[in-house]
């Protein structure tokens, strides 16, 4: 007599429908953050359960331009942190990834990864992505300086 044993192996996360729906509950919600007289940040959507804003645009003299994001910045949201450089050529925004990991109906862990990005306002492009130096600030020379005093972006 020959017995055959079949084992099914699944790789990756098991996602419960309940949490999956929460993660993808992004709705249209216009949110504008004024940076100065001619510049604003515009977020087109909001995920209420995750408390994050998405779809960032730059409004420069009433012209709205979608911010070009590299693949590493895709899927990130914002808690609306921003810091404009003194010469108004760059802005630092937060980039937060929140998602449930190793989900099941009984157990799920919310994973949060906090990053930030420096955006060239004229080009509406990310010029630098950071994780450890997001707590910095702009100096008078328009350089992003970490809280430890290291120049991170010039």
Image (cartoon, grey):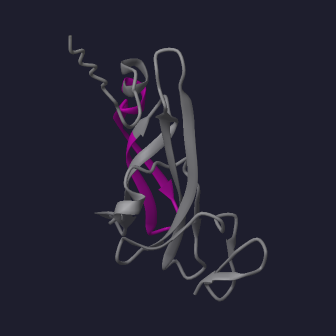
Q: Quadrant of the C terminus?
A: bottom right
**Left or right: 136 as drawn, with respect to 78:** right
Q: Judge whether 30 appears above or below 115 on screen.
A: above
Q: Residue at x 40, y 61 (%)?
A: 72
Q: Quadrant of the N terminus?
A: top left
Q: Position of residue 143 (x, y in %)?
A: 62, 83
Marker count (numbered): 0
Q: Residue at x 44, y 69 (%)?
A: 38
Range of residues picked out in magenta: 21-45
| Secondary structure mostly seen in the magenta stretch | strand
**Left or right: 69 as drawn, with respect to 116:** left
**Left or right: 136 as drawn, with respect to 70:** right
Quarter-of-image position of residue 120: bottom left
* Magenta-drawn stretch contains 68: no
Q: Is residue 44 visible?
A: yes
Q: Position of residue 145 (x, y in %)?
A: 69, 78
Quarter-of-image position of residue 71: bottom left
Q: Is residue 36 visible?
A: no
* Magenta-drawn stretch contains 39: yes
Q: Judge whether 129 appears above or below 22 on screen.
A: below
Q: Residue at x 50, y 41 (%)?
A: 98
Q: Position of residue 53 (x, y in %)?
A: 45, 44
Judging depth in this view, the residue of 45 and 96 nearest the camera is 96
Q: Position of residue 138 (x, y in %)?
A: 66, 76
Residue with the most extreme front position: 1
């Amino acid at each position: 007599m020959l017995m055959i044993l079949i084992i099914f192996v699944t790789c990756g996360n098991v996602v419960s429908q309940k949490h999956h729906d929460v993660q993808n509950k992004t709705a249209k919600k216009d949110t504008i953050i004024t940076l100065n007289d001619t510049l604003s940040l515009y977020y087109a959507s909001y995920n209420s359960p995750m408390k994050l804003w998405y779809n960032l645009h730059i409004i420069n003299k009433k012209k709205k331009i979608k911010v070009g994001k590299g693949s590493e910045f895709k899927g990130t949201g914002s808690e609306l942190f921003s810091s404009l450089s003194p010469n108004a050529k760059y802005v630092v925004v937060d980039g937060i990834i929140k998602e449930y990991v190793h989900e099941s109906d009984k157990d799920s862990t919310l994973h949060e990864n906090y990053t930030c990005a420096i955006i060239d306002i004229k080009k509406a492009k990310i010029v630098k992505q950071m994780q450890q130096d997001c707590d910095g600030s702009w100096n008078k020379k328009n350089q992003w300086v970490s809280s430890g005093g290291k120049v991170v972006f010039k």
